[in-house]
Image (spheres, rainbow, N blue to C red):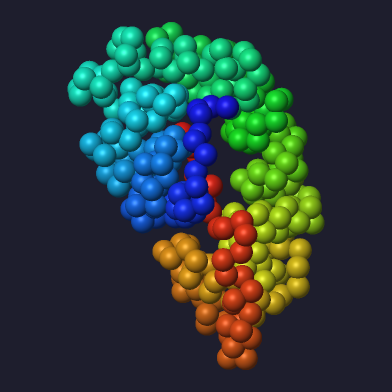
Amino acid sequence: MLPSVWALDDEAQAAKDEGMRLYGIRKADSAIPYLEQAAEAGDVEAMYYLGEANRRLVMGGMNQAALDWYYQAAQNGDPHAMLRLFDGGACELGDVCPKNGDDWPQEALELTLPKAEAGDPEAMAALYDIYYYVEDPDEDEAMKWLRRAAEAGHVESMNWLGEIARNDEEGYANDTERLEAAEPWFREAAEAGYAPAMNNLSVVLDQLERHEEAWQWMINASEAGHINGRLWQASCYFQPEEEDNEICQTEKDPAKGWALLLALKEEVPGSTSENALTYYGYGENITPEQRQEGEEMMDEWLNREPPLSYFPDKFGP
């Protein structure tokens, strides 16, 4: 596995789970004290995400707290932490360098390649990022390892291959070809339970005018905790008949839509559910009876498992 993870006691594991939940709904500042409990108990993943959380507090820059946590994660073998240290100029500017030199991407490669060659899907996936960072970036080698990771069952790699195909305007003759190339990768990851791929598959199927299947996958994404899926589900209950809402293969049910939006607003404060309640006027186009019915149903949609998330990429912007 990549990297090694210490076995956490119940208290530390619960803290990590809550920290990751908060990080997943873009509450980085609130996530930090929970992730610190897990990191101090030896969890390397928590160390890395503490670096990410602190970095997000300074709009993607590098503050001292982020540097310290990335360095701890790097010392425990996390290759993405090493790439973050390189991005932040840690060796050049802060003399935070690998033990055997001054090249963090090379350190990440030397650590990760043997694990990938031994069959570790996480290491294979990490190599995709690493090969873009080494002294002579090798896109072909990066793509080779991304495909190997996907073929080994790594759902994030499957989903990323789908996104690459969907966005490749030069590699395909038209939009339909791009979407049809992306669909199998999204579907494989979606059927393996990966919520972002469910959301992506739904969007692709909708663009291919396969609206009934697109609607079912959007519902699946919602039930798997994807915030976009939950928002689409709610909005469809308000306006399934709208011209651009062919994906909404459902009957109108404003009370249920109201319940979903209220629960989403409470569970994910500051989310776009608040815009849906105000800007889109859903609150104005619902009867008092429907509003009351929705308020009574709201608890059914609160704090479900798995928790709601934006599912941020581990090595995103």
Q: Tell me if I can see residue 28 in this picture.
A: no
Residue displayed at 53% across by 67% down: 264
**Quadrant assignment for the N terminus:** top right
Q: Position of residue 13 (x, y in %)?
A: 50, 49
Tally of numbered tags:
0
Q: Position of residue 3 (x, y in %)?
A: 50, 28
Q: Is residue 56 left or right of residue 243?
A: left
Q: Is residue 77 left or right of residue 258?
A: left
- Front in this rendered view, residue 116 or 24: 116
Q: Residue furthest front?
A: 9
- Asked if one can make out residue 294 in the rendered structure from this viewpoint, the answer is yes
| Quadrant in which residue 160 is drawn | top right
* Image quadrant where residue 164 sits: top right
- Asked if residue 87 is positioned above or below residue 293 in the image, the reply reads above
Query: Could you tell me which residue is drawn at 33 percent across and 22 percent down?
Result: 86
Q: Residue 88: where, in percent of width, then height? A: 29, 28
In front: 62, or 69?
Answer: 69
Identify the residue shown where x is 27% and y is 44%: 58
Figure check: 78 above or below 299: above
State the residue at coordinates (62%, 13%).
117
Using the rendered view, name the quadrant where residue 252 is placed: bottom right
Q: Residue 225 placed where, x, y %?
A: 61, 56
Q: Residue furthest bottom?
A: 289
Q: Would residue 57 be found to the left or right of residue 243 on screen?
A: left
Q: Which of the image's four quarters has the C terminus?
A: top left
Relative depth, front residue between 279 and 145: 145
